[in-house]
Image: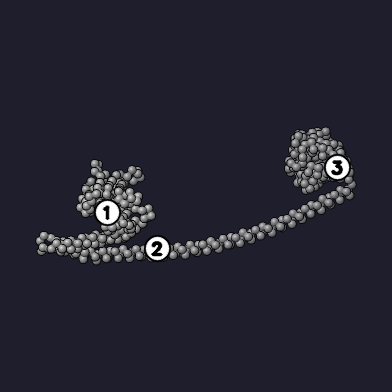
């Protein structure tokens, strides 16, 4: 510790409480401490100096009390002097008070411990005498260096003589002020506690309200979930009932319709008795109607089986070139269109595909028939290519036409069973509204997807993506070979 002072030699330092180690100290008017009256004056001077440094009331009392106790303990030592100063000198941050003496007993430990509880203190013992340095930190509001030094010098020049009675009265005033401050703090604490309790009650009330609202919301969600579950069960039962109805009615209708078709065919056979022109026309009309009804019954039965998941999938390698040729002959034999050209791919290279060939034919037949039905002139094109996506092997089947297209507001409903887009285009083009829903259901059963885009007056594009089920086919073949 570097302390500027005119008194006694230094010895080993002993630190107590908050460290009071300081740099160079600029002392102001050191004075001797030789009597009790001087100790009383020291207390008064310390309090005035602390007030001049803009310290709070509590800090003033702490400093004055600590210096008073140390002065009484050191009273009677030879060469006892007290000096006040500021450190550092250029920008003071602490008020420093130094006790120096040249002979006498060391300070009592109890006194040092008491002072250390109030202020920062360092004690330096020496073979003859010693030094105690007391430090009180200053606040930024204390002012500049020159102003602080001037105020401290004014306080010390004025001096402060005091009697024991004055000192007792000062201590009493300090005690009363401290008690009053303590009472005010206690009252403030009580108010804070009341505000905290009120806040806690508000938080508890809010928590209770939120809990009740959450419970009500949960009850509503549970009720809604139960209602939705009931609706789902009802819809499932209705769907199962619809499927059973379609299946039963299709079976019941197929036998008489087959009879009508067969009898009309027999009547038109060359071996049958000759019919008049009017009779032949009527029988042909009966036969055509029978074929139409039989096709409708077959479609209903297939849709019912597909929705119920009763269609068995038989995977095998598909020769796409033969499949395209078969489709072309099937479509052209039943749809004669002089103004519409059916374009199919040549497929110079065989594309690998393992799937259910029968279901694939049904998908493409429905899509091509639908495209031809609503195309008055132009072309219907079938394209087949390997899916460029590297995620999994698949084949893309694309059917495009130059037909009437579908209005944008109808695109979301074309996959509803029995739904047909109404308009002049329906004239002369009877349908059931089963083609697209049936094709998409079959595509999904084969693990693929069907997407549709259309522009009104420009045509429609349908894309079917079917995965190559070669891995599953190879595994099934291996299992069949392993059977006894």
Secondary structure of the residue carrying numbered label 3? loop
Q: Identify the residue at horizontal 31%, vertical 52% (top origin).
A: 404
Secondary structure of the residue carrying numbered label 1? helix
* Image vertical order of residue 182 relative to residue 123, above or below: below
Label whose residue precedes the other's in the sequence (2 or 1)? 2
* Mark 3 Cα-neighbour bin, 10 Å: few <14, some 14–19, many ≥20: some
Residue 17 visible in the shown view: yes
Q: Between residues 273 and 111, which one lies in front from this camera angle?
A: 273
Task: Residue 100 in the image: state x and y as whole percent.
Answer: 82, 37
* Mark 1 Cα-neighbour bin, 10 Å: few <14, some 14–19, many ≥20: some
Give the residue number, with chain letter if any, for mark 1.
373
Residue 433 picture quarter: bottom left
Q: Nearer the viewer, mark 2 or mark 1?
A: 1
Give the residue number, with chain letter if any, for mark 2.
232
303 left or right of 4? left
Q: Identify the residue at horizontal 37%, vertical 64% (top origin).
A: 235
Do callouts 3 and 2 mark residues in contact (Cβ within 8 Å)? no
Do callouts 1 and 3 mark residues in contact (Cβ within 8 Å)? no
Label whose residue precedes the other's in the sequence (3 or 2)? 3
Q: Nearer the viewer, mark 3 or mark 2?
A: 2
Q: Identify the residue at horizontal 58%, vertical 62% (top origin).
A: 208
119 left or right of 199? right
* Mark 2 Cα-neighbour bin, 10 Å: few <14, some 14–19, many ≥20: few
Q: Between residues 255 and 244, which one lies in front from this camera angle?
A: 255
The disc label shown at residue 86, or none = none
Give the residue number, with chain letter if any, for mark 3.
75
Q: CA distance from mark 1 to mark 3?
A: 124 Å
Label whose residue precedes the other's in the sequence (1 or 3)? 3
Q: Between residues 95 and 291, which one lies in front from this camera angle?
A: 291
* Image vertical order of residue 11 relative to residue 229, above or below: above
Task: Residue 137 in the image: state x and y as whole percent.
Answer: 75, 42
């Amino acid at each position: 510790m570097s302390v500027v002072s005119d008194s006694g030699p230094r010895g080993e330092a002993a630190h107590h409480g908050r460290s009071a180690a300081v740099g160079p100290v600029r002392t102001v008017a050191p004075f001797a401490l030789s009597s009790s009256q001087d100790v009383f004056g020291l207390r008064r001077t310390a309090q005035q100096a602390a007030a001049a440094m803009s310290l709070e009331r509590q800090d003033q009392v702490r400093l004055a009390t600590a210096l008073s106790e140390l002065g009484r303990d050191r009273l009677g030592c030879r060469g006892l002097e007290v000096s006040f100063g500021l450190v550092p000198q250029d920008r003071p941050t602490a008020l420093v008070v130094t006790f120096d003496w040249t002979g006498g007993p060391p300070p009592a430990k109890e006194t040092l411990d008491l002072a250390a509880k109030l202020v920062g203190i360092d004690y330096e013992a020496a073979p003859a005498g010693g030094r105690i340095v007391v430090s009180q930190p200053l606040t930024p509001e204390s002012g500049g260096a020159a102003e602080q030094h001037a105020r401290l010098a004014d306080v010390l020049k004025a001096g402060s003589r005091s009697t024991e009675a004055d000192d007792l009265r000062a201590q009493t005033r300090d005690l009363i002020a401290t008690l009053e401050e303590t009472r005010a703090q206690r009252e403030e604490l009580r108010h804070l506690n009341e505000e905290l309790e009120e806040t806690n009650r508000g938080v508890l009330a809010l928590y209770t309200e939120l809990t009740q609202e959450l419970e009500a919301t949960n009850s509503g969600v549970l009720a809604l979930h139960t209602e939705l579950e009931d609706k789902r069960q009802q819809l499932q039962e209705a769907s199962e009932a619809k499927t059973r109805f379609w299946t039963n009615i299709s079976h019941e209708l197929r036998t008489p319709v087959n009879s009508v078709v067969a009898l009309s065919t027999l009547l038109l056979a060359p071996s049958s008795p000759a019919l008049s022109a009017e009779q032949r026309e009527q029988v042909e009309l009966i036969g055509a109607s029978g074929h139409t009804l039989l096709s409708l019954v077959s479609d209903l039965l297939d849709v019912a089986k597909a929705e119920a998941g009763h269609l068995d999938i038989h995977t095998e390698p598909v020769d796409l070139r033969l499949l395209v040729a078969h489709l072309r002959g099937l479509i052209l034999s039943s749809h004669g269109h002089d103004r519409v050209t059916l374009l199919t791919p040549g497929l110079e290279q065989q594309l690998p595909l393992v799937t259910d060939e029968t279901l694939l034919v049904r998908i493409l037949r429905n899509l091509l028939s639908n495209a031809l039905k609503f195309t008055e002139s132009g072309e219907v094109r079938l394209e087949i290519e390997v899916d460029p996506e590297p995620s999994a092997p698949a084949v893309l089947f694309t059917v495009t036409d130059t037909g009437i297209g579908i209005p944008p507001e109808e695109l979301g409903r074309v996959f509803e069973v029995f739904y047909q887009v109404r308009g002049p285009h329906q004239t002369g083009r009877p349908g059931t509204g089963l083609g697209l829903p049936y094709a998409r259901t079959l595509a999904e059963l084969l693990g693929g997807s069907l997407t549709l885009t259309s522009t009104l007056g420009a045509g429609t594009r349908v894309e079917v993506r079917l995965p190559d089920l070669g891995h599953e086919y190879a595994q099934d073949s291996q299992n069949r070979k392993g059977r006894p």
